[in-house]
Amino acid sequence: MEQNQIQRNMWNGAAKAGLALGIVSSAYLFISQFMGVAKMPVFLNMLLGMVIWAAKFGGCIWLMTFFMKKFASENREADNAMTFRFGMITAFLSALVYAAVSFANVAFISADMFTEQMNTVMQQMAPMMDSNTMAEMDKTMENLPQITFFSNLIYCFIFGTVLSAILSRNIPSRDPFADYKPEEQ
């Protein structure tokens, strides 16, 4: 019964953490996309882009650490392996949220922008491509939403899993003297 409660707490906490991480990453997606079409000087755009990326990167690491520590403190019997599992579930769920948002962005929200950009690239590259390459590029464009979904899902899951493996080594913190027994006198 106790194990079922821990599993339920793990999935509930991971769902909340995954949603928070997915929202942060999705917000970055739309902010960076807006900055790409905004009429700002190039230097300012690059500088602001780097600052926002660093904030997202650091914020995601901080959020993952926060949620993993919260899980470990709420479940006293949780060890490093359980914390890693929690982080891995969080990574999967946040990757799923972000991949779904990026799919919706490419397929529906900003589909015309992606089509326009691809047409511009195709026009510039047309003299260097043969008809087979042009046909394959068209097929790729048709499958771009699916490619975006699965590539983001895989990348974000791997990144989150590696991050949770690194963080879970010290969450919960280990007592180096736990096995020490003083000599009885």
Image (cartoon, rainbow, N blue to C red):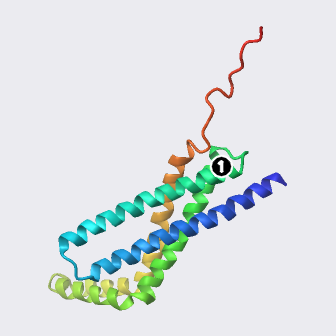
Q: Position of residue 107 (x, y in %)?
A: 44, 87
Category of crowding for the residue at label 1, using alpha-carbon neighbours closer than 10 angstroms: few (below 14), some (14–19), many (at least 20):
many
Closer to us: 148 or 42: 42
Closer to us: 117 or 179: 179
Q: Position of residue 136 (x, y in %)?
A: 32, 84
Q: Quadrant of residue 116?
A: bottom left
Q: Residue placed at 19% from the left, 88% from the top?
A: 123
Q: Residue placed at 68% from the left, 28% from the top?
A: 178
The quarter of the rendered structure image containing the C terminus is top right
Q: Is residue 11 above or below residue 182?
A: below
Q: Residue placed at 64% from the left, 26% from the top?
A: 177
Q: Residue placed at 31% from the left, 84% from the top?
A: 137
Any part of residue 159 in sight: no
Relative to residue 87, is residue 158 drawn left or right?
A: left
Q: As shown in the figure, which amino acid type bears the numbered disc 1? A: Ala
Count of marks placed on residues: 1
Closer to us: 75 or 4: 75
* Residue ranking furthest to the top: 185
* Residue ranking furthest to the right: 1
Q: Quadrant of residue 39?
A: bottom left
Kindly identify which residue carries mark 1. Answer: 72
Q: Quadrant of residue 125?
A: bottom left
Secondary structure of residue under mark 1 = helix
Any part of residue 155 in sight: yes
Q: Position of residue 1 (x, y in %)?
A: 85, 55
